[in-house]
Image: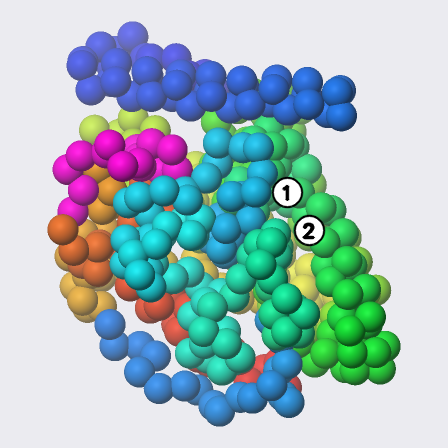
Amino acid sequence: MNEFLISPAANSAPSVCIGLIKVFFFVIISILYGHNNNNNNNMGVIGATKVMTLNQTVVPALFAFGDSIIDPGNNNYLKTIVKCNFPPYGRNFIGGIPTGRFSNGRIPTDILADEILNIKKLLPAYLDPSLQLKDLLTGVSFASGGSGYDPLTSQVVSVLSLSDQLEMFKDVIRKIKAGVGESRAGMIVSKSIFLICLGSDDIANTYLTTPFRQPHYDITAYTDLMAESASSFIQDLYKEGARRIGVVSIPPIGCVPSQRTLSGDISRGCNEQGNQAAILFNSKLSSLLTSLNNKLPQATLLYLDIYNPLLTLIQNPATYGLEVANKGCCGTGNIEVSILCNPFTKQSCNDASTYLFWDSYHPSEKAYQLITHMVFDHKINNFF
């Protein structure tokens, strides 16, 4: 597949624009990849009530690992362009502050920690220098926008890999042990919920957009690579004491606004190649978790399906109080994300709560709240 070439038959102005956009994304990622190599060489309706009243005796903390869906600002402290700590991001957050969350407001881990687990209002970024021991005791997020199961995914854009995130969690364990003792630290880790959410960037960016993997892997082999990485990471968490682990599936990535744009479809339909890749990986992830549940004593591993809830919102937005589902609120909504959605971006919507997507890749706070409850309201009790 010549992902970056413009078809001879598609010589209209829209097709030329699509081609230029693809070239732009390819060049940006290639520059980042080269820069990082140099650095390495140098060195609506749902969720009105809680499912159950959970307290910190039942679930003392929430620890999150993943990508931009649950990154509350770790990328603010990294040398990467995958950032969003500037307006209009965060315009509906507390105080209208852009915190580094890839949305207009709260993200799923905030909603899970507050509205479902009843632990705390917001799940903070581990790299936030203002964190104290009390924050660590109730959980943090190690997630980094642009990360993936494939180590190359994070390397290309200079963000935290899964192995980086694991090392940070080990550091947290050491700090908790030093602060409250080994016995209580062990209890906290064993009773906490661990959330893993990534994989979209592997498919949408590393596999479908860059030339680094397709020459060496077909999609079956590539999703095998992703699943093997997921398996290793889950078992590494288990070795560190984690017992309650939820793993989020990949969404219908071909239906996010940027992928509709990059597909070149003039009608802006979903990119079925991306969706089929997501379905393939999700089936492997589900089977993997079943296998690991049988292999790891006292572990509870839950497959958390986000594919179907998000697809439901995309296909039936009005049912959930949404009006626009095929483009984001920021700018034109077709391509703006991260640094392309910035204080100089024009034409942004007035009310993000009517949009399923905030930018061309990430849902709005309203959508996140709907999806989080759709996923967890009937699953959370399965951890116990």
Residue 160's disc is 1
Location of residue 259 in the rendering, given as x and y in whole percent from the top left corner = 36, 36
Location of residue 149 in the rendering, given as x and y in whole percent from the top left corner = 64, 45
Direction from residue 161 to residue 102 in the image, left or right: left
Image quadrant where residue 316 sits? bottom left
The answer to whether residue 334 is above or below residue 284 is above
Residue at image location 78% in from the left, 59% down from the top: 170
Residue at image location 47% in from the left, 17% down from the top: 27
Q: Earlier in the sequence, mark 1 or mark 2?
A: 1
Front residue of 41 and 293: 41
Q: Are marks 1 and 2 in contact (CB under 8 Å)?
A: yes
User: Bounds of the magenta span?
Assistant: 335-349
Q: Give the residue type that dot 2 points to.
A: Gln
Front residue of 191 and 176: 176
Which residue is denoted by mark 2 in the rendering?
A: 165
Location of residue 299 in the rendering, given as x and y in whole percent from the top left corner = 74, 75
Residue at image location 61% in from the left, 19% down from the top: 35
Q: Secondary structure at mark 2?
A: helix
Residue 235's disc is none
Location of residue 191 in the rendering, given as x and y in whole percent from the top left corner = 70, 80
Q: Give the residue type that dot 1 points to.
A: Leu
